[in-house]
Amino acid sequence: MHIAVCLKHVPDPSTVEVDPLTGVIDDGRVLYMLNPADESALELALRLRPADGKVTALSIGPADAEALLREALAAGVDRAVRVWDASLGPIKPAITSILLAAALRATGVPDLVLCGGHSADRGSGTVPALLAEHLGWPAITDVTQFELVSGRALIQRRLARGARAESEVLLPAVLGLDLDRIRLRQASLPKLMRAKHATIPLYGLDALDLSPQDLHFPAMTLHEVMPPRPRARVMFTPDPAASVEERVAQILSAGVAGKAGQILEGGTPEQQADAIIDFLRQHGFLERRNAL
């Protein structure tokens, strides 16, 4: 069983400070940490790893992202991989999914991919589904519990208003986890020292057989923002040919005529039905019959 876990380094909320004069975040004081949802996914992968299995940790980011990968190595993952290229700018979820899919193919396709459901900085929750699309695998998000049994995963997922649904999926698959936070196990000093000096392979676009054009998507371009155009209101004016009393009544009623009804009395049911049909034809609800 080969399990891959996608990790992301996010700003530590306790270190984010805003300049009271300019309103700009002071980047010099921001520290980064392992995304809490990804931390839970990593610890769960280590718990699920069988004796003959392995766990791979992947992360997309500059050199600063190596810190969380070394933390994963110290916790016990078998391999850590970093994906980055100098040509990359701000990473959007769509680009993240392409890079992760290419990295998984380049480093060995796993049997199961675990992702944190949401990141602490963006929180879009779209990466698991997009990644599964590029891999051609099924994806299940909002997973609160799951169990691996004979090449399939028995899953419980969260629905709206606190409801839960149970299902199963054949492996390989991508799971987006929505767990209560699980703290990553404490690493021993020898493991911390080995992780500190470990070599973490770096995969750029060339190693992933990708080009910058592969990461470009047709996107909507915002040209102008215009407020909604209000509907023209039809102003009522009384009939100038009517008498004064009638015009005053029209003004008081704002031109809304009172509802009028017609009561049919007497006659057979067939005659009453014919009278209703004639009424509907007179008011345009039914087409008039052509004279023979």
Image (tube, rainbow, N blue to C red):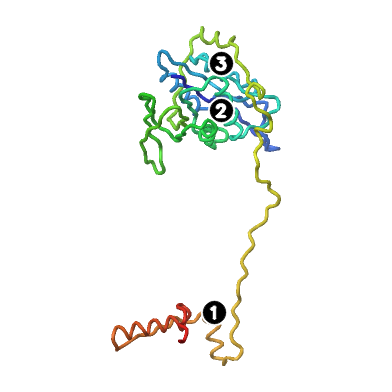
Residue 140: percent from left, percent from top: 45, 34
Q: Secondary structure at mark 2?
A: helix
Between discs 3 and 1, the one toward the N terminus: 3
Residue 109: percent from left, percent from top: 51, 22
Q: Nearer the viewer, mark 1 or mark 2?
A: 2
Q: For the point 45% across and 17% down, which residue is it?
A: 185
Q: Nearer the viewer, mark 3 or mark 1?
A: 3
Q: For the point 63% across and 27% down, which residue is it?
A: 30
Query: Where 278 falls versus 187 (above or below)?
Result: below
Q: Which mark is residue 254?
A: 1
User: Badge 3 is on which residue?
Assistant: 70
- The CA span between labels 1 and 2 is 65 Å
Q: Secondary structure at mark 1?
A: loop
Q: Which mark is residue 89?
A: none
> On the rendered structure, is 263 left or right of 135?
left
Between discs 2 and 3, the one toward the N terminus: 3
Q: Nearer the viewer, residue 186 or 176?
A: 176
Q: For the point 29% across and 83% down, which residue is it?
A: 269
- The CA span between labels 3 and 1 is 76 Å
> The disc labelled 2 sits on which kind of residue?
Ala
User: Badge 2 is on which residue?
Assistant: 101
Classed neighbour count for the residue bearing mark 1: other residues with Cα under 10 Å, few (<14), some (14–19), many (≥20): few
